[in-house]
Amino acid sequence: MSNAKWADVIGWALLAVLLVLALTSGDTYTLKVVLWISLNILAAAALRFVMLTGELNIATAAFWGVGAYVAAILTAWYKLPFFLSLLIGGLAPMLLSVLFGYVTLRTKGPYFMLISFAFTEVLRLIYTQTESIGGNSGMIGIYPPRWLDPYYSAIVVAIVAALLAVFFWLERGAFGKLLKAIQNNDAVTESVGIDVLKMKVICLAVASFAAGVGGALFAHANRVISPGDFSFLVAVYALAYVKIGGETQFSGAIIGAVLLTLLNQYVIAFGHYEHLFFGGAIVVAMLVLPNGLMGLFERVAIAFGGTRENAAPAARGGH
Amino acid sequence: MDLAAQLLVNTLQIGSVYVLFALGLTLIFGVMKIVNFAHGEFFSLAALVVAVLMPVLAPALGLPLWVDFLIALAAAIGAVLVLGTLTYWIGFERYLRDLVGSFILSVGLILFLQGVFVEIFTATPRPVEPIVTGTISIFGGRITAQRLLIVALAITFTAMLYLVLQRTKLGKALRAVAEDREAAMLQGIRYRSISFYGWLIGVSMAGLAGALIAPLTVSQPAIGGDYLIKAFIIIIIGGLGSIPGAIFGGLLVALIESIFGYYYDLTIATIIMFVLVMVFLLVRPQGLMGHVER
Amino acid sequence: MTRLLRTLALLTATGFASPALAQDTIVLGVSAPLSGAAASWGIGTDWASQQAAKHINDAGGIKVGGKTYKVEVRSVDNKYTAGDGMKTAETLISRDKVKIFTQSVGTAPVKAIQALTERENILLFTSAWGRSVKGPSFPLTFTIINTPDEVLAPIYATVKQRHPEVKNVLMLNPNDASGQDTAKDATKFWTEAGIKVLDSLYFERSTTEFQPIATKIVSQKPDIVDLGGTPPANAGTVLKELEVQGWKGVKVIGAGTGSDVLVRTGGTAANGTYMGLAADFDGPTATEVQRKLNAGAKEVLKESLNVIHMGGYDGVMAAKAGIEAANSLDPQKIAEALPKAVFDISYGKAAFGSKDVYGTPQQLLIPIVVTQIQDGKTVEVVRIVPDELKKRLGQ
């Protein structure tokens, strides 16, 4: 098996472990950690999917938030069924992302990054100014149905795994090759008759659907949401998972999210040193592992006689 | 009180510091093609150093306050240069022209440095005694002498940077690299050393802004964050890498803040800025004064 | 740096945050902002809480059912948001088996934590103000500082009596859950005091440039400016700007804490300001315990304590009192026993009460103090010991 295949096996095996833990563990803390890891994996995968086109989409955080608010309003106010609100929680940000993408994806690189950043902060400020959704205090009492409570972690892992399977399938198929071609050289891609903008918007829409579902799951897991939960930091952390896991590999997002979430749980006990250690860990990881853990894995594999996989180059900011 | 004059005076006060801060950010982008999210930390460091030193220097040296301030300012810039050199050597040097990698590195640095600053300086808000006292009226708009002094210093530093960029050999090399790196390298400009100087000048501008703001406000480790978000807006409006753009953008953002902060509130003003940024980018994706990125 | 090393040593020694603590230790949780603009609140709260734990352990610990327990305080960073408040609280509850939160700071995170603690039978002490976190629907939540409901009526009455000519007020508050709650209460109490509210403004907590707001305030020519829940450092800056732009009126900070920071930032512009929550823990009316704590904080944290910090100390002491009164570690039983207990906290003897206001006796009864800044010094203007407390203490 080639290295890339091995990497995939590791990623899916990790998800399987999460699912088994969610189904069998009776310990509430384990279940919570499994839940947080799964949600972080989803955020990282959604961010990484748009990175295939070479763009860093900070607005992943914005769509995550839209999904959370929409789903929360649907279950808490209108008493809609949980799964229906999940679906709408995905569709609403998807629609919004099509509008957003259609106008903003004409820019690229640092400009798109900063505009998606601005978009995220505008939405957050608008939540704080909207009295009906609780303003700065946010919304409370967002519960999944009671019968679902004991299985909630398992449901989340399953949904995340299903969405990841879709991402995986798309990335390996013709669409994924197209996205990578856009990343490598969008002018050439355009010249062979492909509507680059349209492809980018579709890519963004798919990722935003997943982000929205993630936000909806987050809202029901956390039971409270407030504007502060949807700042650009959501995307920043997601990017940290992707980078430290290794962005060239699909599994990088999974491994990065697992490790950093566990690390974060560990440093919470440090009280006000939490930041110091978590930030320090990110810096050290970036210096020691420029290609992430998957890059390290690849190097080790090559050293043991494997072959270098022709992995996609990373998003490099449109230059 | 003449309202229009007051709003303009407010704009000038806020804008002068924004401009300094954004100039550093845009210079770093121009030369290194990275967005330095940790820019606010250099600002905070300088502000904290000034806020810590000022109360100590006055009784120890017995010199006039403005001399103390100049010493504190020099110390602050020194601290910023040390931190800048360290972060460049250890980290940013490896992520030149890598938008995503440098982004994560600087976010890690933000968290880390915030923790370090709280440890060294504590999280207590630190005020500084005014250097000069009194209030001055400009066409009916009122401003403290202290503020006026700071505005004057900010304008001086901005002008100095401008002259350095326009007149000196280093400045010309910096501009050439920002314009077209390959062509500059063909001309024999050493990119790596130039980008190091660009970085140091850039973070020093953040440091200057921080040192200047310290006597006007209360400093604590998280103070840089607010300026960072504003600075992003400024450099998008002005065009990434554009020096005149940063000056114009800084003043425009300050004007919006001053006017909309008066008629509505500051949150609305910020929302309006963001919306303006989006409209701007749609009409002119390269920013107001930027050139097309390739 | 020594604090950092000590923490590391402690963590290594205790097996790094593992839940496998010695069985005879009660772990108490503290949820407060330990980073960002509000970090100084959390760090001071953590420090004061640790002092209370040390005090209890030095005196032999807590006795329940013939067994003696040591206490340990674990503080987590709620980053002032609901999401992080929830996450860190869940970690403390499910991993560290925390049954009591002795202090929780910030209205948004506290509302989030409360949704969890009330459901999972966990005791929550808080300094969050606003009626939305109090009352019969929250039987396990206890408030451990005076809140606008206790403070605003007396301070506004004092202002009205000392400045009979004032007709209207303009309010400024931070734009977050705490600020919005304060503004709501303040509007009610000003109106009841017969003063017209001209406008109620908000600012983002991260704001550093206050000139536009000051210009806006000055142009409306209010008789009184009430900075409500504005943190002292910001309040000082605002007052300075107001003075520069020529406004001369009555300055009030209804829910103002920490007067020394206000004086240092506001300079002479702070003179005359009335404050509702700015207890002076150095002054002649402070207790011995408070003076000692304050001296310690000045040395270690380089900062005087404010009432929120002190809430950290008092929360731990109240928890101890509750556990001993109930003779049980069950939060339910503690919550039932607490309202009947009279116990020692930093203010001396205290109790929980105010059933007639909130419907349940879960508000800490401590003296209400209105202070004024005079020539840079904090001076007590009015001191009211609640009647209910006097009765409980048999005075």
Image (tube, coloured by chain):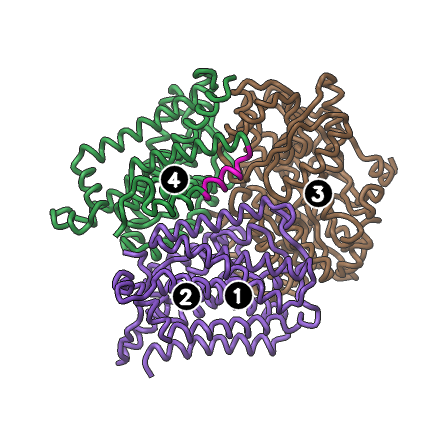
Chain colours: A purple, B green, C brown
Residue drawn at the location 33% of the way across and 84% of the way down:
A1
Give the mark, 2 or 1, whose residue is nearer the N terminus: 1
- State which chain disc 3 sits on: C
Q: Quickly name the residue at label 1.
A: A39
- Residue type for callout 3: Gly
Of tags 2 and 3, the one toward the viewer is: 2
Q: Main secondary structure of the magenta part?
A: helix
The reply to whether dot 1 and dot 4 touch (C-beta < 8 Å) is no
- Residue type for callout 1: Leu
- State which chain disc 4 sits on: B
Q: How far is mark 1 from mark 4, CA to CA? A: 34 Å
Q: Quickly name the residue at label 2.
A: A49
Residue drawn at the location 29% of the way across and 63% of the way down:
A190
Q: Could you say which is closer to the camera, residue C97 or residue C186?
A: C186
Q: How far is mark 4 from mark 3, CA to CA? A: 38 Å
Numbered badge on residue B234: 4
Q: Element under label 1? A: helix
Q: Element under label 2? A: helix
Q: How far is mark 3 from mark 1, CA to CA? A: 33 Å
Highlighted range, magenta:
B264-275
Q: Is residue C54 left or right of residue C3?
A: right
Q: Could you say which is closer to the camera, residue C124 or residue A246?
A: A246
- Residue type for callout 2: Phe
Q: Is residue C102 left or right of residue A226?
A: right
Q: Check if mark 2 and mark 1 are on a common chain.
A: yes
Q: Element under label 3? A: loop
Circle 2 crowding by C-alpha within 10 Å: few under 14, some 14–19, many from 20: many
Image height of C74 relative to C179, above or below: below
- Residue type for callout 4: Ile
Q: How far is mark 2 from mark 3, CA to CA? A: 44 Å
